[in-house]
């Protein structure tokens, strides 16, 4: 039978019969007449429809309502018109044929009609979609609510598309993005390509992120990530650290490419987020991206640009496996780490000498670590230099990479547009800022047992618990420092802004507790509330009255065409949701930067050292290419081989091969050996001068 039930609607105003026609009968027929036979009367048409559909689903039969406008259509579709009930008691079901012409399924799994979402289910999908729940989890939620639910995941995706289309309306992607950004009070900038309306770069920052940046400006960590959007544009993320050692997102930027000019534009926008002109980051932590490093030097010339130790050690470890013998890899790896962690320049020189001595047989590895890392960049990652810099213990980019991971978990895939990514960022930021506020509050009502001592009386509630933990750890070194004069190093003071062991030792001797002023301001900020302190010139900086007056004067002095042009430019600023900007029309290549051994691509002026996994991929690909090249070479050389002789492998095969090559048969090998022996004897002096004396007996 066709997997549907056909029925028609009459024109009576009161009682109606609803004839139900199931199918024609054949050899595998199943009779469902009893299931649909009922003496019940239904008040409204909607009630009878609902009863028939529920009965059909319970009996694994799909019921579909069809309408025929003409008698001819009714005949072709086998739809029977209903007639008014004789007693006018309401609607009733009249089963004309309840036989199903094939076996019924155990479940109606995958049936598009039965799997349609109800109004309640559609609302449930909409609610979960707003919370960025993946479609597969939405489907599981629906099945948990109703075990008999047979909705497919494709129907979830279709309804999500309908929801997104309804929300966006006639706006384009960039217009809708700007609408969301404006409604959330974000600070943002964008720019387009010179030759068209395609957006080139977009930079935005959450208002709470701007506040946190101005409260904790000392250390910033930056990195770009990929696979977040369907345009393949890199997403550049900047993060900072609060006094409670929680990460906060400062700003995001979609970039056309990772070139110095693009990075300068992004960092210049970052610089405009600082309320005070004289406030700049003291430390910016990046990986070895030469374009980004150059941009940092241009925009923040007084800032220390440190490099990620984790990626450096990872890359050096891969090179160690490539150049160093296996039994020496662990030793050289340990010596390398000793060099990186050297606490002063004298110690650095001694440890570097040990490394050089251990690498006497692997000069390629030594050249790599010297020329790539130590000579040009040792001040950016070796302890002897960075211990003098206030970095609060942040020597890797792990925080920003962790932020990348959390964001990608929220996004779900890399097939979305910029609106989807922004919505995920915005949701993630709300969670992040909530956690930061909670961590501030814990400082006031939670005290750890290790900090109950009177030595910390002035600090409890005034500095973060993270700072107190580090102070307690440093205090545990006091005995070691007192017994080893000159071993303090003062790293806690210079790198963390906290009192070091020798400093606390002097206070303990005289019985004075730690003072709040001995702790850097970074650790003493425990609230986001209130307004940020402004410079005296801040008022004049944001005054636009003169600019608006000048704009009006210019507008009134122009002709009609000029007024139209100026008005369109002003409208673009005043009404960003009407922007003509559009996203990249195609997926663009973003990872085409210069490789170490290759031609420099046009337009790329920098080089980024690959990460460890990239070295592994390159090694694997290189091995495969060499194998393929070897096979190709053998195939290409075969047409030029005119003769191949397989000589006997009896220990004299070399002499046999030479004999065959000279035109003798291979059995003439004895003559070749005799002639060679005679020549060695006659010209003994010559061969000894060439190859040294023969010591064999």
Image (cartoon, rainbow, N blue to C red):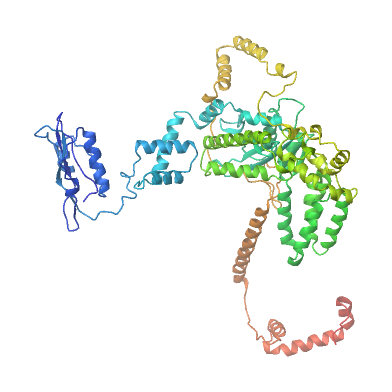
Q: Position of residue 320 (x, y in %)?
A: 74, 59
Q: Position of residue 236 (x, y in %)?
A: 64, 39
Q: Residue at x 21, y 32 (%)?
A: 44
Residue 21 in the figure: left or right of residue 548? left
Displayed quadrant of residue 54: top left
Displayed quadrant of residue 155: top left
Q: Position of residue 565 (x, y in %)?
A: 57, 18
Q: Position of residue 244 (x, y in %)?
A: 69, 38
Nearer-the-camera pick, 166 or 440: 440
Specify whether residue 211 is in view: yes
Q: Residue at x 89, y 77 (%)?
A: 689
How many numbered tags mark residues here? 0
Specify whether residue 588 is in view: no
Q: Residue at x 61, y 11 (%)?
A: 552
Q: Quick one: quadrant of the C terminus?
A: bottom right
Displayed quadrant of residue 367: bottom right
Q: Is residue 508 above or below residue 167?
A: below
Q: Is residue 478 above or below residue 27?
A: above
Residue 13 in the figure: left or right of residue 418? left
Residue 159 in the figure: left or right of residue 618? left
């Amino acid at each position: 039978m066709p997997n549907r039930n056909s029925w028609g609607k009459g024109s009576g105003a009161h009682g109606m019969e609803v004839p139900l026609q199931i199918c024609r009968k054949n050899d595998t027929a199943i009779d469902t007449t009893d299931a649909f036979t009922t003496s019940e009367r239904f008040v409204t048409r909607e009630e009878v429809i609902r009863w028939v559909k529920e009965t059909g689903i319970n009996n694994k039969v799909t019921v579909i309502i069809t309408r025929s406008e003409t008698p001819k259509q009714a005949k072709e579709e086998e739809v029977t018109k209903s007639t008014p009930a004789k007693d006018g008691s309401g609607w009733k079901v009249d089963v004309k044929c309840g036989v199903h012409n094939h076996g019924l399924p155990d479940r109606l799994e995958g049936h598009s009609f039965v799997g349609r979402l109800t109004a309640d289910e559609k609302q449930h999908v909409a609610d979960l979609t707003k919370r960025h729940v993946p479609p597969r989890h939405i489907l599981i939620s629906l099945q948990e609510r109703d075990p008999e639910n047979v909705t497919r995941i494709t129907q979830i995706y279709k309804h999500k598309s309908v929801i997104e289309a309804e929300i966006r309306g006639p706006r384009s992607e960039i217009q809708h993005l700007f609408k969301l950004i404006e409604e959330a009070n974000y600070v943002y900038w964008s720019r387009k390509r010179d030759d068209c309306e395609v957006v080139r770069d977009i930079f935005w920052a959450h208002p709470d992120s701007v506040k946190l940046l101005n409260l904790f400006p000392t250390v910033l960590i930056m990195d770009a990530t990929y696979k977040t959007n369907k345009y393949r544009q890199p997403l550049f993320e900047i993060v900072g650290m609060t006094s409670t050692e929680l990460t906060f997102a400062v700003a995001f930027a979609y970039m056309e490419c990772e070139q110095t000019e693009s990075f300068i534009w992004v960092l210049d926008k970052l610089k405009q987020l600082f309320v005070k002109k004289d406030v700049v980051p003291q430390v910016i932590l990046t990986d070895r991206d030469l374009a980004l490093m150059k941009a940092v030097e241009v925009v923040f010339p007084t800032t220390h640009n440190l490099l990620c130790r984790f990626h450096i050690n990872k890359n050096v470890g891969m090179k160690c496996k490539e150049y160093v013998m296996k039994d020496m890899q662990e030793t050289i790896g340990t010596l390398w780490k000793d060099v990186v962690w050297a606490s002063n320049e004298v110690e650095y020189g001694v440890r570097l000498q040990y490394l050089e001595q251990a690498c006497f047989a692997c000069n390629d590895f030594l050249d790599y670590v010297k020329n790539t890392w130590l000579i040009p960049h040792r001040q950016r990652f070796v302890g002897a230099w960075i211990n003098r810099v206030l970095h609060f213990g942040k020597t890797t980019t792990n925080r920003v990479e962790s932020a990348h991971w959390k964001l990608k978990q929220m996004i779900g895939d890399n097939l979305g547009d910029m609106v989807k990514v922004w919505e995920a960022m915005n949701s993630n930021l709300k969670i992040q800022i909530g956690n930061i506020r909670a961590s501030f509050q814990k400082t006031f009502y939670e005290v750890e047992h290790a900090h109950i001592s009177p030595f910390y009386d002035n600090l409890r509630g005034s500095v973060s618990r993270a700072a107190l933990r580090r102070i307690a750890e440093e205090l545990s070194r006091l005995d070691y420092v007192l017994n080893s004069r000159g071993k303090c190093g003062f790293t806690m003071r210079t790198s963390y802004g906290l009192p070091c062991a020798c400093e606390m030792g002097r206070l303990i001797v005289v019985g004075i507790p730690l003072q709040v002023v001995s702790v850097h301001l970074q650790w003493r900020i425990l609230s986001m509330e209130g307004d940020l302190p402004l410079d005296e010139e801040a008022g004049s900086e944001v005054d636009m009255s003169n600019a608006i007056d000048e704009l009006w004067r210019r507008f009134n002095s122009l002709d009609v065409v000029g007024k139209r042009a100026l008005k369109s430019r002003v409208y673009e600023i005043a009404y960003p949701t009407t922007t003509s900007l559009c996203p990249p029309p195609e997926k663009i290549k973003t990872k085409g930067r210069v490789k170490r051994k290759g031609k420099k691509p046009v337009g790329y002026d920098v080089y980024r050292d690959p990460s460890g996994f990239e070295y592994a991929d390159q090694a694997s690909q290189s091995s495969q290419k060499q194998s393929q090249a070897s096979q190709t070479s053998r195939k290409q050389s075969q047409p030029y081989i005119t003769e191949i002789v397989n000589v006997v492998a009896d220990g004299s095969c070399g002499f046999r091969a030479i004999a065959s090559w000279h035109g003798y048969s291979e059995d003439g090998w004895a003559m070749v050996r005799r002639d060679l022996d005679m020549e060695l004897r006659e010209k003994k002096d010559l061969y000894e001068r060439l190859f040294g004396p023969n010591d064999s007996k």
